[in-house]
């Protein structure tokens, strides 16, 4: 019996957002809107998305001993995430400085801060969390060696889910543990380079050859493609048609929902079909964490 459905190992950032009429050029200053500060980072987002759905979720992350760190701890607790694995100190909390123009285009500067100090040693020190977690998920906003140690720390029959975002080279040891590897089109093309074929089925086939046990490719409004290495089968799952307002965090909501449903014993295709409904719900509202639905909201649609 596991204490946690999902342990997320990943980043926690403060998103600092300013609206501007146009973004400044070199050496230029422009005036913008009032500052909005939101809890973010892919790890923090996934943990909140899972907890909002009803998962017993924990987050292993590092924040600074500062106001942004307290914002992140508070937002995780408010969502019902167990913060026993949230480490404090070592560097300022990671920050994303975001300017958004009236067309919705944004420019983002990220200071990884404490996220870059989440070390393999921190993972080893959290061994009891790993032993208590049915599914473990990670992304790439923390050091790659920390993701490698995450894979080495998995409990005997727990399951590992990776969203390699932002995309970077992945060691064979990490790829072999993924069940599934979850990528969007951009991440699939990065991992495959010039060898990427024209269709998602081509990408899935080529990605499976790299070693993951299964692959899920998210396709925005078109849903997702599920590819299982054991059966070499491909299944498309549909996303409900919705009026998309803001797609920020859709990928995080999808990954968290899929991981949670896997922890409940669903097949990968069943879990992906549910996750597509969660991703669709998330794009109907502004923001990232603020947009994540409860399970009741998903089932009511
Ligand atoms: P992001 O980086 O914006 O968080 P992503 O690029 O990682 O997202 P997407 O493929 O855009 O991931 O979206 C993840 C899932 O969310 C999709 O598989 C789909 O189920 C749902 N989704 C995203 N956009 C839409 C949309 N416009 N309409 C319906 N569902 C959507």
Image (spheres, helix red, strand yellow):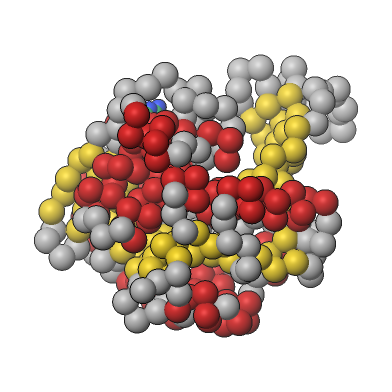
In this view of the protein, can residue 201 be seen by the observer? Answer: yes
Quadrant placement of the C terminus: top left
Quadrant for ligand 1?
top left
Q: Is residue 129 left or right of residue 11?
A: left
* Residue 230 vertical placement versus 150 (above, below): above
Give the percent coordinates (x, y) of residue 118.
Answer: 65, 70
Q: Residue at x 36, y 74 (%)?
A: 1
Q: Residue at x 46, y 36 (%)?
A: 293
Give the percent coordinates (x, y) of residue 212.
Answer: 30, 66
In this view of the protein, can residue 202 be seen by the observer? Answer: no
Q: Residue at x 73, y 24 (%)?
A: 19
**Front-most of 292 and 160?**
292
* Residue 95 vertical placement versus 224 (above, below): below
Give the percent coordinates (x, y) of residue 294.
Answer: 45, 39
Q: Is residue 180 left or right of residue 269?
A: right
**Front-most of 195 and 280?**
280
Q: Is residue 147 left or right of residue 176?
A: right
**Picture quadrant where residue 220 is located:** top left
Q: Residue at x 50, y 59 (%)?
A: 57
How many numbered marks are there?
Answer: 0
**Picture quadrant where residue 172 is located:** bottom left
Give the percent coordinates (x, y) of residue 204.
Answer: 25, 52
């Amino acid at each position: 019996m596991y204490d946690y459905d999902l342990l997320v190992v990943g980043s926690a950032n403060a998103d600092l957002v300013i609206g501007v009429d146009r973004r400044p050029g070199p050496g230029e200053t422009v005036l913008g809107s009032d500052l909005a500060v939101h809890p973010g980072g892919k790890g923090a987002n996934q943990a909140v998305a899972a907890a909002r759905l009803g998962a017993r979720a924990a987050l292993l992350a590092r924040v600074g001993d500062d106001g942004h760190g307290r914002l992140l701890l508070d937002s995780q607790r408010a969502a019902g995430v167990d913060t026993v694995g949230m480490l404090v100190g070592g560097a300022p909390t990671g920050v994303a400085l975001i300017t958004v123009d009236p067309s919705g285009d944004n420019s983002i500067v990220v200071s990884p801060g404490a996220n870059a100090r989440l070390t393999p040693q921190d993972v080893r020190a959290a061994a009891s969390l790993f032993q208590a977690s049915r599914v473990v998920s990670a992304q790439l906003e923390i050091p790659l060696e920390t993701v490698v140690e995450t894979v080495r720390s998995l409990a005997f029959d727990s399951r590992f889910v990776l969203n390699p975002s932002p995309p970077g080279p992945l060691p064979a040891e990490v790829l072999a543990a993924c069940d599934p590897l979850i990528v969007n089109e951009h991440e699939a093309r990065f991992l495959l380079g010039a060898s990427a074929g024209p269709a998602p089925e081509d990408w899935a086939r080529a990605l499976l050859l790299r070693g993951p046990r299964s692959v899920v490719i998210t396709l925005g409004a078109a849903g997702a493609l599920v590819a299982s290495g054991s059966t070499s089968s491909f299944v498309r799952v549909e996303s409900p048609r919705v009026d998309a307002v803001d797609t920020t965090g859709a990928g995080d909501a999808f990954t968290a929902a899929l991981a949670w449903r896997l922890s409940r014993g669903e097949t990968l295709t069943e879990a992906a079909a549910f996750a597509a409904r969660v991703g669709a719900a998330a794009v109907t509202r502004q923001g990232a964490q603020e947009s994540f639905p409860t399970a009741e909201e998903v089932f009511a649609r």
